[in-house]
Image: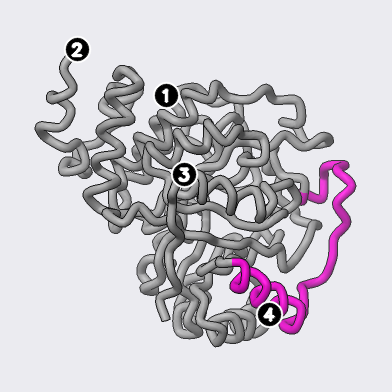
Amino acid sequence: MSIATPLAEPASTFTSRWTVDSILGLYARPFMDLLLEAHLVYRQHFPDLDMQLSTLLTIKVGGCPEDCHYCPQAARYHTGVKAKKLLSPTVVVQAAKAAQAAGATRYCMGAAWRELKDRDLPKVIELVRQVKDLGMETCMTLGMLTEAQAEALQAAGLDYYNHNLDTSPEFYGEIITTRTYEERLTTLRHVANAGMKVCCGGILGLGESRQDRAGMLAVLATMSPQPQSVPINHLMPVKGTPLGEMPPLDPFEFVRTIAIARILIPKARVRLSAGRANMSDELQALCFFAGANSIFYGDKLFMTENPALAHDQALLNSLGITCQKAQR
């Protein structure tokens, strides 16, 4: 078997041509060929092969009215998560300083809301400003945004806004019924139009088919502009949610999806996100080779476990992977 063919014309040069069928063609390729091409695309756009470290803090826990079937923060599910008020700036900044000291360059703040309310906008703007003052990149995920809210967050200095697709348009209704796919896309348009960077990805292992995985990637790849950050999550089943007993996805299928995301969206930071606590070091190393160059760094990821800082540091050191430096 020759390895020259996949290198002759990098697939990443044809971003606008991607369809579900063409992406399924990538899934069908021999595993090693796919990883090789993804790694070469990765090296082309990120020659330093550095890892971007983000830390996520839940600034508003629980009580969400949505019915996302995977989420322990949905008020309708019995998961033991109690609703709490928005954290104070003092608490958020203290946690951001600790994350920065541990090596994180981006600080992500998430709230269990269906949408951002105008009454809460001044509070989250103040959080953005205080974290920015530390010299960190900022990201928020607060649910749906209006055009005016997106513009206000951008004016405050918010760098990234996260709003995931979760899955394909066709499978979406099996996972969420309280918010439409088009509503998600509308928020993403507001974010991009306001001049913020888009952080958008999805979740694998929801019971979706390979075609659904390809469908989600097709939507991401054909966004204009493409997302600058693409988190790929592996479902962490939580008891009490409708997906609490879902079996894990085949690990090679997960790595394939990371590789295809890298090929389709070559300039993005592809983040290996939720689910790392259940992944072996060897599986994570395969994902890094396939083009994942961002991780969430810290012991908690929303309400689920994340690898310990010391473990992540040891893994990256053993692989010889350096970490991205702060931009200022």
Q: CA distance from mark 3 to mark 2?
A: 28 Å
Q: Secondary structure at mark 1?
A: helix
Check disc 4 and report the residue beneath it: 93
Per the image, is 71 magenta? no
Q: Is residue 4 visible?
A: yes
- Circle on res. 211: 1
Going from N to C along the chain, the mark reached first, 4 or 3, is 4
Check disc 3 and report the residue beneath it: 319
Q: Secondary structure at mark 3?
A: helix
Q: CA distance from mark 4 to mark 1?
A: 42 Å
On screen, residue 107 above or below 132: above
Q: Is residue 181 visible?
A: no
Image-quadrant location for residue 250: top right
On screen, residue 116 above or below 316: below
Q: Nearer the viewer, mark 1 or mark 2?
A: 2
Q: Residue type at mark 3: give it.
A: Leu
Q: Nearer the viewer, mark 4 or mark 3?
A: 3
Per the image, is 90 magenta? yes
Q: Nearer the viewer, mark 4 or mark 1?
A: 4
Q: Secondary structure at mark 2?
A: loop
Relative image position of residue 252 (x, y in whole percent): 47, 23
Q: CA distance from mark 1 to mark 2?
A: 27 Å
Relative image position of residue 92 (x, y in whole percent): 71, 76
Question: Is 306 on the left-hand or right-hand side of 146?
Answer: right
Relative image position of residue 158 (x, y in whole percent): 49, 76
**Which residue is nearer to you in this view: 322 or 187?**
322
Who's the residue at 43% across and 45% down the image?
A: 292
- Circle on res. 1: 2
Q: Residue type at mark 4: give it.
A: Val
- Crowd class of label 3 (few under 14; some 14 to 19; many from 20; radius 10 Å): few
